[in-house]
Image (tube, rainbow, N blue to C red):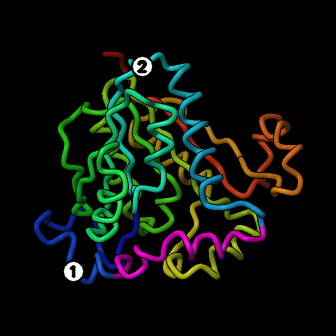
Amino acid sequence: MTTDPAHTLDTPAEEAASPVFEAEFDKYADEYRRIHAQNIRITGEMPEYFAEYKISDAASLVARAGFPADLKILDFGAGVGTSTPYFRKYFPDGQITCLDVSSQSLDIGRERFGSFAEFVHFNGAEIPFPDGHFELAFLACVLHHIPHEQHPDVMKELYRVLRPGGLLVIFEHNPYNPLTVRAVNTCLFDENAVLVKPARLKANAASAGFSRPEIKFRVFFPHVLRALRSLEPALARVPLGGQYSLHARKHGVR
C-alpha cells in the first residue's frame, strides 16, 4: 500500500484518495515485480520468497490462535495482490479481502487473482467494513509508506475491524539493517518511504488497545546461506534481520 505524504487520515472520506494520491503509486503497478526483483537481487531470492515466508509465519500464529478455517482475512495495503496465492495456499478456506488506495494496483490484482480474493478500494481514512469483521489483519511492508503521524489512526482502524481476540500481524523493513536501508533508499516505489522503528510500532499497537504486542526479527541469511535459516527462530530477538514482524491480539473473545 502507498500513500501521499501530505494526506492525513482525518481527511473527509470523500476527499481522502485524490487522483494525485493514487497516481503516485499507480505508475509503478504494472512494473512492481520487475522493480522489486531488481532491488532485492543481492539476497539471491525472488519477490515470491519474501511474500510466502510472511504468510507462512502468519499461518503459524493463526494456528495457535484457534480461528475457524473460514476466517476472514484483511490484507491491508495489498497492492497488486502479491500475497494472494500464498493466502490461498496456507488458508484454503479463508475469506480474503485485499485493500489498497491504488485503483490500478487493485485492477491488476483482481485480473490475476479475482477468483481467490475480493479487491476493495481504500479511501485512506476508513476501512470500509463494520466493527469486528475480520479475524486476521495482515500488513506486509506497508506502514513505511504512510506518514508516521498517521500510524496511530491506522492502528485504531485495524483494531476496530478486528473481532475480539482477533490477530494483527505486521511485517516491516528493519531500519537497523544497513543492507535493508540501502535497498529501500534505491527503490523507485520507496522514494517517499520512512522506515518504522520496532519500538515505535510496538508502542502504537499498544496505544490502540492491542494486547501484548511482540516484535520478532527475520531474514538473516541470503539464498547462498539458506541452510542456516533453521536458526532464525533462535535469532528472533537479535535486531539485525533484514525485516521484522509484530503480532498482537485484540482484547476480548467472541
Closer-to-camera residue (180/30): 30
Amino acid carrying mark 2 in the image: Phe
Residue found at the far left of this picture: 14
| Residue ID for mark 1 | 19
Q: Is residue 40 magenta?
A: yes
Q: Secondary structure at mark 2?
A: loop
Q: Residue at x 34, y 40 (%)?
A: 96
Is residue 102 positioned above or below 223 on the image?
Answer: below
Q: Please identify the quadrant where the C terminus is shown.
A: top left
Q: Quadrant of residue 4?
A: bottom left
Residue 253: x percent and y percent? 35, 16
Residue at 36% x, 57% y: name it: 112
Residue holding disc 2: 67
Does 47 appear above or below 237? below
* Secondary structure state at the residue bearing disc 1: helix
Say whether residue 52 is left or right of residue 137.
right
User: In terms of sequence position, does the residue under pointer 1 or pointer 2 come before the other?
Assistant: 1
Q: Residues within 10 Å of mark 2 (few under 14, many from 20)?
A: some
Principal secondary structure, stretch drawn in magenta: helix
Q: Nearer the viewer, residue 64 or 86?
A: 86
- Give residue 48's position: percent from left, percent from top: 60, 55
Please report the residue visible at 50 percent of the width from the left and 77 percent of the height from the top: 189
Magenta residues?
A: 24-42
10 Å neighbourhood of mark 1: few (<14), some, or many (≥20)? few
Q: From this view, report whether residue 175 is shown above or below residue 63.
A: below
- Residue 113 among those drawn in magenta: no
Q: What type is the residue that disc 1 sits on?
A: Pro
